[in-house]
Image: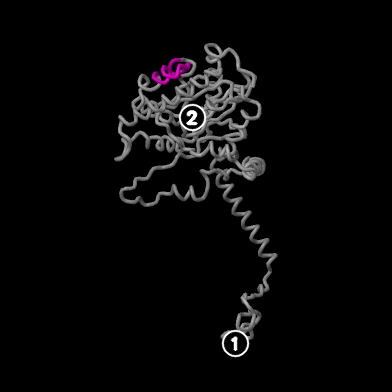
Amino acid sequence: MPSSISSSERAGFVRLTASDRPGVAQPVPERDVPARPWRGIFIGTLVLMALLLAAWEWHWRDAGAPGGYKNSNGLWSIQRRRIDHGEGGATVLIGDSRVLFDLQLPVWERLSGHRPIQLAIEGTSPMFALEDLADDPAFTGRLLIGVAPDIFFKGAQRRTGLLTYYRKETPAQRAGQWLSMHLLEPYLAFDDPDFALFTVLKRQPWPLRPGRPFLADVRKLSVIDADRNCHLWSKVENDPDYREQARQIWTQRFAPPPHGAPSRDRTQAIAQEQIERAAAAVIKLRARGVDVIFVRMPSSGAYLAYENKIFPREHAWDVLITRSGAPGIYFEDYPELSGYTLPEWSHLSAADAERFTASLYSIIERDYWLTDKQP
């Protein structure tokens, strides 16, 4: 039976259906591509896409966003592989964002003659890196472990799977990281996770669901280079509104724990577990000649008050130093490590980070490490 709508009834359009081809097995409908100015449509689409991208880039540049690199798993893996490729005797820095933002690699290199390997990760306890290095016989250098009590003693893990990525990174992933680093990231301000469209939509003032309080995510705080040298974004320091927003996000942590959160006794038990894990790893490192030092990085204001309340020095830091047997530098014990500007209470301004790095290195060189080991 012929098709109910014949090709003659649809001027300018020809379609062959199964009824038009009797006896043909597995009939496949055929449809002619309509005559359209496809070249013009393609060019117009490219122009529209370029205009939209340019507008999005202009929007974030106007907001003060710099071009820079993404602190991706691939970027971290590049630095971790330096140990595998002959730099096992280097100085390695691990910790959370305070080590990442506040210790400046160029300053350390100028003073020591060698550029450290920066393996700190924001919002994440250094325990995973500490235990990984303790199990890696290729690492024989020096290790600085930054301690932010709220992260270290809680065993916070924001970047889970990082070691798995480093160990199983595929050639395609390495190539993608290289292309992104060299062709996109340094030139596009909007190519930052904090400026992604869905991230922007998520933090709009949507109506709250009953029983589901809104918790704002940490906003962009830093600018990072290709070798993971990092510093606080100037907007946090110079824009009062943005700085206050960053502080308000931190204060979410200071509120009483919600129902179902670990009790104070459980929090202290977790801290003791972290101390025991750190002590075991440090003992293993020192047994093969690795110099280890803990540094209590600066904090101020409401953040410092919160840390002192939840993890008092005598119950956390002092126990860590005693159990591990490693030396420790507590910022409040040294005048040259105190009195710096921390715009949002947790990280040093870019200028102060350089001065802090120089002061910290001088203390370490004077009291602990005579010179850096040769990588």
Residue positioned most to the bottom: 1
Q: CA distance from mark 2 to mark 1?
A: 73 Å
Residue drawn where x is 31% and y is 40% of the image: 260
The span shown in magenta is: 318-333
| Up/down of 269 relative to 204, above or below | above
Is any atom of residue 6 visible in this view?
A: yes
The kind of secondary structure the magenta stretch mainly shows is helix
| Image coords of residue 109 (percent x, y) | 62, 22
Quadrant the C terminus occupies: top right
- First in sequence: mark 2 vs mark 1: 1
| Residue position marked by numbered label 1 in the rendering | 2
| Residue located beneath label 2 in the image | 126
Image coordinates for residue 135, horizontal then vertical, percent: 53, 27
Which of the image's four quarters has the N terminus? bottom right
Under mark 1, the amino acid is Pro
Which residue does the image show at 37% across and 26% down from the upper left?
A: 272
- Mark 2: give few (<14), some (14-19) or many (20+) Cα within 10 Å: many
Residue 86 in the image: state x and y as whole percent.
66, 26
Visible in this render: residue 360?
no
Which quadrant would residue 85 be assigned to in this image? top right
Q: Is residue 300 above or below residue 233?
A: above
